[in-house]
Amino acid sequence: MVSQQDFRRAMAALPAAVNVITTDGGAGRHGMTATAVCSVTDEPASLLVCINKNARMHDLLRDNGRFCVNVLAAGQDGVSGAFSTRDLSIDERLAQAGAVIALDDGQPALAGAQVALGCRIAQVIAVGTHSIFIGEVEQVLIGQGVGALAYYERAYHHLGGAAPLSGARA
């Protein structure tokens, strides 16, 4: 069996897009930084997000049944940091992110994100310490520029340039 330390070291060598997952609904509003996000299929358009079962976001996401994947743009290191800081409230996190767009279903999308994908949870699969949330994509907002924030070898890397999402409002 592979040790946890070796596995984590190996995963640090796997470049990943940096995302902020947001949710809002009857269970409450919350958001967190995540790199464990991946497309599943384009018919129906769906993606997966892996969340630790002990994370506050886990039960809120499950109970709200909806979420938004905000793919961070190059230069949004501070936004990623804000959404991974336990000491900040969701309002403080959103304030550090700047303008927020309400998706058609009310999910908060970060206006500065490169892409925002509004999802409805289609399935939840428990695996070890995490749950895999499979979301069917119901709305997409695409930024006007190019560029993304990546995480590799435990550091942020900027890929290309970036522009805010169209339709942004404060």
Image: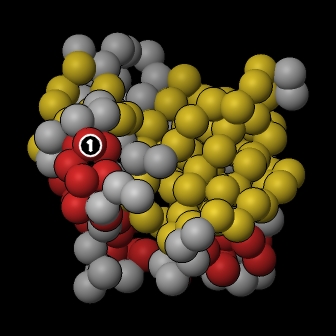
**x 52%, y 43%: residue:** 37
Q: Quadrant of residue 151?
A: top left
Total marks in image: 1
Amino acid carrying mark 1 in the image? Ala
Image position of 82 with respect to 148: above or below: below
**x 23%, y 15%: residue:** 160
**x 75%, y 60%: residue:** 125
Is residue 167 in view? no
The image position of residue 148, as x and y in percent, is 32, 26
Q: Is residue 167 left or right of residue 13?
A: right
Q: Quadrant of residue 93?
A: bottom left
Which color scheme did the rendering employ for the protein?
A: secondary structure
Q: Nearer the viewer, residue 113 or 156?
A: 156
Q: Is residue 123 left or right of residue 31?
A: right
Mark 1: which secondary structure?
Answer: helix
**x 24%, y 53%: residue:** 6
Give the quadrant of the N terminus. Answer: bottom left
Image position of 9 with respect to 71: above or below: below
The image position of residue 119, as x and y in percent, is 73, 46
Is residue 62 in view? yes
The image position of residue 68, as x and y in percent, is 61, 50
Q: How many C-alpha atoms fall within 10 Å of the one at disc 1: few (<14), some, or many (≥20)?
A: few
Q: Is residue 24 left or right of residue 50?
A: right
Q: Nearer the viewer, residue 161 or 100?
A: 161
Which residue in the protein does label 1 denote? 10
The image position of residue 49, as x and y in percent, is 59, 51
Image position of 41 with respect to 68: above or below: above
Q: Nearer the viewer, residue 106 or 63?
A: 63
Q: Residue furthest front?
A: 1
